Amino acid sequence: MASAAAILLASAFLHASWNALLKRERNPEVAVAGVLVAALAVALAAAATAAAPRFASGPAIAWGVAAGAFEGLYFVTLAAALARAPYGAVYAIARGGAMLVVWPAAALLLGEQVSPRAVSGAIVIGVGLALVALSGGRRSRPGGITFAVICAASIAGYHLCYDVALSAGARESPLFALALATALPFLLVSLRVRGALATAAAPSRGAVLRWALAGVLCTASFLLFLRGLAMSGAALALTLRNTSVLFAQALAVVIGEPVGRRQLAGAMLVAAGAAIVSSAP
């Protein structure tokens, strides 16, 4: 379990890092498409080196596609939330909110154990999320917090789908590549419908390099997460990965975003609740 925890903590830091890079972009809703293309290229390269069989069953492929649909929703709503609300608030709501969905869903759908300690941890997370939402909402444009909440639901969805796909015989890198290949058309259609692509300026060389870096960090983060997920389980994996909420607050300061006391306290409660849940029997 110690090795799984180390892998998931590394994944958490990388995940918070690429989200911070996306927040720095002038137009996150367009930049996320470039990040996704870069992430897909890296994932395909990793998948090419995976041992056969890459998918041991039809259900593994089907659940990978389902994960990709949720990934598509995740990328769309994440970029929309970051364009309208502070990075630290969006990150805490999305990650902590996903955990509130995954724990009961994992118990009902996957038969994972839920103890009284886990429930108490979820309550602590809920209080923390309320503080973050109240703080971030004051500095958000309309829709920012709503998109963060929808993003949380999409994160929960792809976590559960990935868990089932791995159990059905999928290997980590081909699974993530399949999910991203499914998510990319979803994102492009969303941008086209809203006219975002037509009005977007051609990216500069610097922007392309930033998107490439974010894409590498994104893929590395998810592949580490999938390895930890295979070693632990959906609820525990998401719990440990939610330590990224604290990384996100530190990165928010680095990129020049103010982090108020209420937001920081809420983020710390989310992390504390995650710790309580992860220690539950």
Image: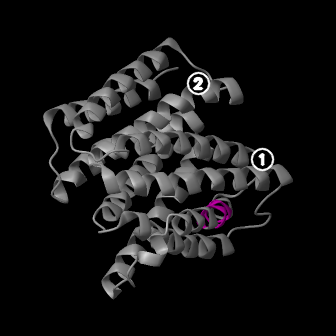
In this rendering, the answer to whether 155 lies above or below 108 is below
Residue pictured at 41% horizontal, 70% vertical:
31
For the residue labelled by badge 2, is the local secondary structure a helix, a strand or a loop?
helix
Please tell me which residue is depicted at 29% across the width and 47% down the height of the picture.
141
Magenta stretch: includes residue 264: no
Q: Disc 2 to disc 1, how far (Cα)?
A: 21 Å
Q: Main secondary structure of the magenta part?
A: helix
Q: Which residue is mark 1?
A: 168
Query: What amino acid type should be assigned to the residue bearing mark 2?
Result: Pro
Residue 269 shows in this picture: yes
Q: Which mark is residue 104?
A: 2
Name the spot of residue 52 as percent of width and height, x first: 78, 66
Rendered position, 103 above or below 61:
above
Q: Quadrant of residue 95?
A: top left
- Residue 59: % across, % down: 82, 49
Left or right of 166 on screen, residue 268: left
Mark number displayed over residue 137: none
Please state which of residues 126 and 165 is positioned toward the viewer in this rendering: 126
Instruction: Find residue 102 and report its horizontal and vertical position in percent.
Output: 56, 32
Q: Where are the magenta residues, as a range?
A: 176-184
Number of numbered discs: 2
Task: Give the secondary structure at mark 1.
Answer: loop
* Residue 1 in view: no
Label 2–label 1 contact, CB within 8 A: no
